[in-house]
Image (cartoon, rainbow, N blue to C red):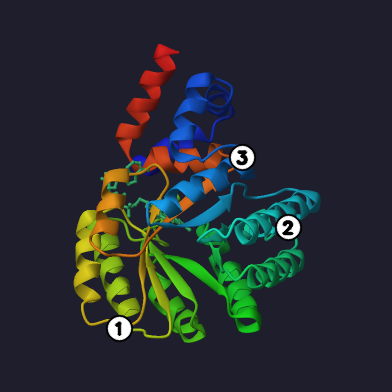
Amino acid sequence: MMRSVVLAVTNRSLTKKLVTETAAGRAVAHRFVAGDTLEEAVAVAEELNTMGMSVSLDHLGEHVTAIDEATAARDSYLACLGEIADQQLDANISIKLTQLGMGLDDEVAARYLDEIAVAALGAETTVTIDMEESEHTQTTIDLYVAAQKKHGNLGIAIQSYLRRTREDLDRIIPLGGHIRLCKGAYAEPEDVVFQSNDEVDAAFDRLGALLMESPDVKPAIASHDIARQVKVIEAARHRQDPWEFQVLYGVQRDRQAELVSMGHEVRVYVPYGEAWYPYLTRRLAERPANLFFFMRALVKG
Ligand SMILES: Cc1cc2nc3c(=O)[nH]c(=O)nc-3n(C[C@H](O)[C@H](O)[C@H](O)COP(=O)(O)OP(=O)(O)OC[C@H]3O[C@@H](n4cnc5c(N)ncnc54)[C@H](O)[C@@H]3O)c2cc1C
């Protein structure tokens, strides 16, 4: 409910102008975003690597409206993979398929995904496909399945708030790969997602346990909810194969370090680039306190 209200307000063009064109708006964004450039993202990745955490680099962008923009996004990821190899970063990449043209021309998106997966193999790393709004779930999974069968170095995010996710896993788990379990960040129709936090959390715990029982996949548990983290640690007690926690850059830094000190693998999702506004709105919607922090910064100017 709160998420829908915040996302509805932030989707208004006046709000976007206020946020993107003021110093205060940019300051709040930089709590969650590594910087505008690949260079800044690499510097953050290097620092996180020295702190014992791996990284997933996300060049921000989504819902392109022209193929040229999708081509530019592909090129930016190829450059990013070049840096991962050259700087020997402990990093992979995360991408949104609507950034590669999905929804505009799915064949182009599939081709660009193939090219990125091949480049990632060359850089000895992997590609995770973010999960976007539910209208894109089916095509996202279809493109993932095709690319993972060809290249074998991909992973995908799944959302515990989606009623369909348990069934989707029957198709996804047999392909191996890494599977990022998150709760889900978008405002969605009632018939598509569970309505209460309790239902979303219970689904998260069930899906986490299922992933931990699946030796062929590498589960990536992407939640800052400590109760969920505790449940998943319990579910992983007898697991022999690797798995990791994933966290967002700028969120609960102390807890990130604590998970490392407990001996867990931790990967930080590091977004960068100029198209940070939609990403920021989702982070604001997740936690009302972020909104107050933001309003205070705006008032202080
Ligand atoms: C690595 C990673 C990748 C993700 N990828 C996707 C994806 O592909 N698709 C998708 O739909 N969603 C994605 N998400 C977002 C996810 O779906 C949730 O919206 C988000 O993680 C908040 O849910 P939570 O599980 O952390 O639990 P919550 O119950 O929302 O939060 C638990 C606690 O964590 C802290 N917290 C959570 N979010 C924030 C924040 N923004 N700022 C400050 N504190 C916060 C607060 O203390 C809060 O009380 C991703 C999340 C992570 C961590």
| Image vertical order of residue 109 relative to residue 226, above or below | below
Q: Which residue is mark 1?
A: 240
Residue 5, picture quadrant: top left
Kind of residue at disc 2: Leu
Residue at screen point 40% across, 14% down: 299
Separation of residues labelled 1 and 3 (CA atoms):
40 Å
Position of residue 80 in the picture relative to residue 231 (left or right): right
For the C terminus, which image quadrant? top left
Q: Which residue is mark 3?
A: 275
The x and y percentages for residue 138 are 56, 70
The mark lying in front, picked from 1 and 2, is 1
Kind of residue at disc 3: Ala
Dot 3, crowdedness within 10 Å: few (<14), some or many (≥20)? some
Q: Which residue is mark 2?
A: 104
| Image vertical order of residue 258 relative to residue 16, above or below | below
Comparing 146 with 193, the one in front is 146
Comparing 110 with 114, the one in front is 114
Position of residue 64 in the picture relative to residue 177 (left or right): right
